[in-house]
Image (cartoon, rainbow, N blue to C red):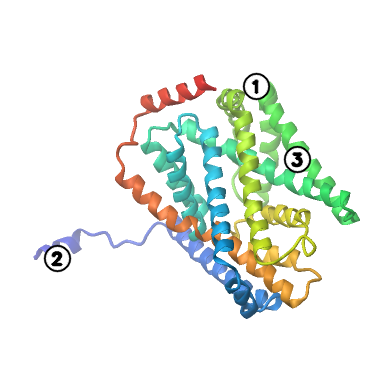
Amino acid sequence: MTDTDSVAADADFSEPPEGERLVTGKRILQSLISTAVVVGIFVGVMPRIASYGDVWDTIRAMTGLELFGLFLVGVWNLVTYWFVLVAALPGMRLREAAVVNQASTAVSNTLPGGGAIGVGVTVAMLRSWGFRISAITRSAVVTGIWNNFVKLGMPVIALALLAFEGGATVARVIAALVGVGVLVGSIVGFGLVLRSEQAAERVGKFFGRLVDRARGVARKPALGSWAARAVSFRRDTIGLLRHRWLSLTVASLVSHLSLYVVLLVALRNVGISQADLTWIEVLAAFAFVRLVSALPITPGGVGVVELGYAAVMTIGMDDATSAKVVAAILLFRAITYLLPVPLGASSYVIWRGNQTWRLDEQERDELAGDAYAAA
């Protein structure tokens, strides 16, 4: 028997486990659906809103200074989220936040189900730098909560501004009231969790029942232990928020508003004036599309986000103005969606090659302690 025959004899040619096949099939199906949605939007829908030829002519007419200014604003937007990560994870340095954020964003923006894979990349990087799993989990939960607070609050603020401007309608008022209710309920629930262990346990049980019922409808098993999770979350989080709630709040607001500024600058640089679209109308469109983009329909919301902005902001416009709006949207997405991809690839290379940032948990805990002391 040759060496090749021996290897073949020892190899396991059995079929992969059923669960693995299901996961693979699910990912393939997600890829096909995402591709179909993206192609349908860009080939079938967007050309009905604006001619790609007119859109390209608009972009070509921009000056180098306008394009460079938009690029700088886009880079600033990327930088702002690094401060959110630094605030939520004591002991993290800004350069580490830059590398981990860009790498995970690149994965999320390019792969079907990339959000989950991006989380895995984040955990692998942070663990290699000495961060404990408990600190990583707490950071992810807290930044998620703060981001959702901002996402829920921005449509409410935008609708209030529209009402003061005279653009209030029954539908907008109802939407604002619903948004206020959800936002207030979320903040109250979060406050109760932090108030005491007993309150955290009650809130955990309440939300646990809601989630488990929803999972039951979807024929998925109950998760259980929500009360214990809420109590554990309170213990892990209360110390962080005591020292970092202000910096976390400010950093989150600045990050979201800087993304809005990129969109506004793109619109103004292609020739959409305040008379065409006020900054309040742009803010309203931005706020509501941000909520829609939270649904993981396509990687990074590609296609869905562009269509959402175009559908909202081109209402009642002529063809020439609509083409300018779509040009601004595509430039905005090129800066905010595509720019992180090469930066993320470079960040991954930096992480793999740079050993000087590798610390053990005790060394990282000392950095975290210094950060708390400084606060």
Mark 3 / mark 1, whichever is N-terminal:
3
Q: Residue at x 65, y 63 (%)?
A: 269
In what element is the residue under mark 3? helix
Q: Is residue 202 visible?
A: no
Q: Which mark is residue 5?
A: 2
Q: Which mark is residue 197?
A: 1
What residue type is disc 3 on? Leu
In what element is the residue under mark 1? helix
Q: Disc 3 or disc 1, which is closer to the eye?
A: 3
Classify 243 as above or below 36.
above
User: Image quadrant for the N terminus?
Assistant: bottom left
Judge by depth and name the residue closer to the eye, 230 or 106. Answer: 106
In percent of width and height, residue 358 lies at 33, 35
In percent of width and height, residue 104 lies at 47, 49
Classify 141 as above or below 151.
above
What residue type is disc 2 on? Asp
Classify 344 as above or below 325.
above
Q: Residue at x 62, y 80 (%)?
A: 53
What's the distance in space between the residues labelled 3 and 1, CA to CA?
23 Å
Q: Which mark is residue 183?
A: 3
In percent of width and height, residue 365 lies at 42, 25
What's the distance in space between the residues labelled 1 and 2, CA to CA?
63 Å
Q: Residues within 10 Å of mark 1 (few under 14, many from 20)?
A: some
Question: For residue 133, which quarter of the picture?
Answer: top left
The reply to whether the C-beta atoms of the residues labelled 1 and 2 are less than 8 Å apart is: no
What residue type is disc 1 on? Glu
